[in-house]
Amino acid sequence: AGWIKRFMLIDIDIEKPSGFLIKQLNIAWILGIFYLTIGFFESAADYFLFKEERMIFSSAFYITIKVISFITFAFFQRGFIMIGGLFRNYLLKIMSFIMIIAILLLNGYDIISLFDSVEAEFIAGASALTFGLIGIIYGISLIRLKKSVGYISKYAGLLEITGGCFLLTIVLSFIGFLIYLPAELLEIIIIFKVIEIIKTKQTENSSALNQV
């Protein structure tokens, strides 16, 4: 459990050198873009697999997509675990970690479904309800960042909440997933904003030391 906390930056030391913090956030936004990009292939594959019961990619390629999707998402949300620690937004830390676990379970199910028959409709409904609820609470945690990073976190949070509400309806869940796309783009911008905040504080501290 200790190595997971260290790797996921759950107990991040806010006194760590700014270079370390910026490096971790750069990893987060870069892999966040990769996650969004591979999401188009993943969504297409899932649609044909569960709606039309046919594969448009080979099993090996589908599994590769799922594994890469989880890894990139985990590093993306790892950035928000760190941001939650930096700004003492504990709800954000908790929800980011929960989202990583939820994606791990969902992608694991998707891979298992290739080799074993499962209740696809039940799992799809349960996933929509689960991610809908998670999305709403995650959105609230993003809105709490408004004082620290500005209104962009409020807009990202409202999109997450709206998307989560659509997911809870199940029948309109596809709209929720579409709404999550601009939300995730705004979340990448939030990471940029935090990097700028860290750089600004670094400059201010350097100037203060030079004046002493």
Image (cartoon, grey):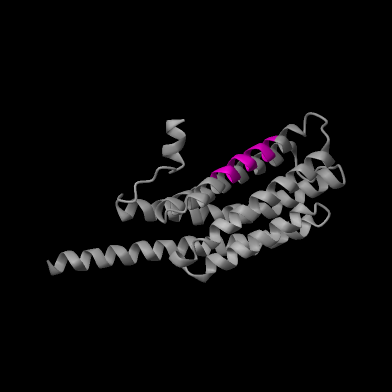
Compare residues 141 and 127 and report the one nearer the observer.
141
Q: x, y (%) of residue 101? A: 60, 39
Q: Report the quarter where the C terminus lies.
A: bottom left
In this view, the residue in front, 70 or 169, is: 169
Q: Residue at x 64, y 49 (%)?
A: 134
Image side of residue 143 versus residue 63, left or right: left
Magenta span includes 96: no
Name the quadrant containing residue 116: top right
Residue 87's image quarter? bottom left
In this rendered view, identify the residue nearer to me: 204 or 181. Answer: 204
Q: Residue at x 55, y 56 (%)?
A: 141
Residue stretch in magenta: 97-108
Q: Residue furthest right?
A: 52
Above or below, comparing residue 39 to residue 10 in the picture:
below
Residue 210 seen by the camera: yes
Quick check: is 100 in the magenta stretch? yes
Q: Is residue 149 above or below residue 17?
A: below
